[in-house]
Structures are given as structure tokens and as C-alpha cells.
Amino acid sequence: MGEIIGRFERDGLNICALKMLTMSREFAEKHYSVHRGKPFFGELVAHITSGPVVAMVLEGEDAIQRVRRMMGATSPADAKPGTIRGDLAESTQLNLVHGSDSADTARAEIANFFSEDELGE
């Protein structure tokens, strides 16, 4: 966790909110609902609920694109060295990071993990 958080901070992104939690199956299925029906959905939900996760909100210029670039390709085999997945991930199914793909997705995902009070809004 520290290595991943440090990479975001070293890139100049600001952490606005951060928490560690264990996702329930119901919460995980909602979070990954776009993948429901895909062959890997069950494994994805099982992995994300197997232990604690760290949810965070990052801000900075072009934050979404920067985070996605830093994460690298979903498959570690396709992820470039220097990216989080390229350096640290063991498999596609046991992924280390998730990042929103758009501002709309980010707003929805942030609302799932953080209350307005936690965000200071």
C-alpha cells in the first residue's frame, strides 16, 4: 500500500480522502457491476472481498489520465515497467489497483466509498 500511495504522491497528486475497509460481497458486486456476467466477475469479487482495501480520492491536473497511466495495462504481462501493475502485479485477476475511467465514473465511485463529511464538501 505504501509503495502505491507513495507513487501517487511523488507524481504530485493530492490525497483528498483515504480509508481502509473490507468490502462486503454486496458492495463489491455493486462496485464492479459493469463486469457482471463476464467470466472473471466471480473471481474479481472474491479477490476484492478477501481482505482490506484502501480507497482514496486523488486530485490534480489531469488526475484520471495520470492515475491510469501510472497504473499501466490491466494485464501485468502488457503493463510497462515503471507502472504499478508492471512492477508489482502478479496476475490480472489479483490486481493491485483500480482507477476510475472518467469523471462521471469517479463521482459515482467516490460517492460509494466516501460520505460528503469525509470529503469535506
Image (cartoon, grey):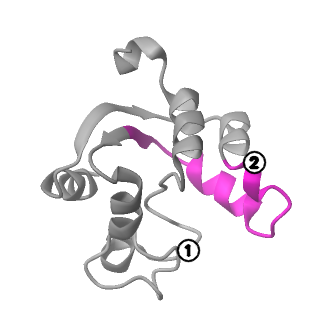
Other residues around mark 1 within 10 Å, as few (<14) / some (14–19) / many (≥20): some
Q: Residue at x 27, y 49 (%)?
A: 61
Q: For numbered disc 2, what is the local secondary structure? A: helix
Instruction: Verify whether residue 115 appears in magenta.
Output: no
Instruction: State which quadrant residue 24 falls in.
Output: top right
Please give left or right for residue 2 compared with residue 93 in the image. left
Q: Nearer the viewer, residue 1 or 99?
A: 99
| Residue that carries the numbered disc 1 in the rendered image | 92
Q: Residue at x 43, y 61 (%)?
A: 96
Q: Nearer the viewer, residue 62 or 53?
A: 62
Residue farthest toward the front in the current orientation of the protein: 61
Q: Nearer the viewer, residue 72 or 54?
A: 72
- Which residues fall within the magenta stretch? 32-56
| Amino acid on which the number 2 mark rests in the picture | Ser
Tell which circle, 1 or 2, labels the residue nearer the N-terminal end: 2
| Amino acid on which the number 1 mark rests in the picture | Thr
For the C terminus, give its image quadrant. top left
| Residue that carries the numbered disc 2 in the rendered image | 33
Please give left or right for residue 66 compared with residue 108 in the image. left
Q: For numbered disc 1, what is the local secondary structure? A: loop
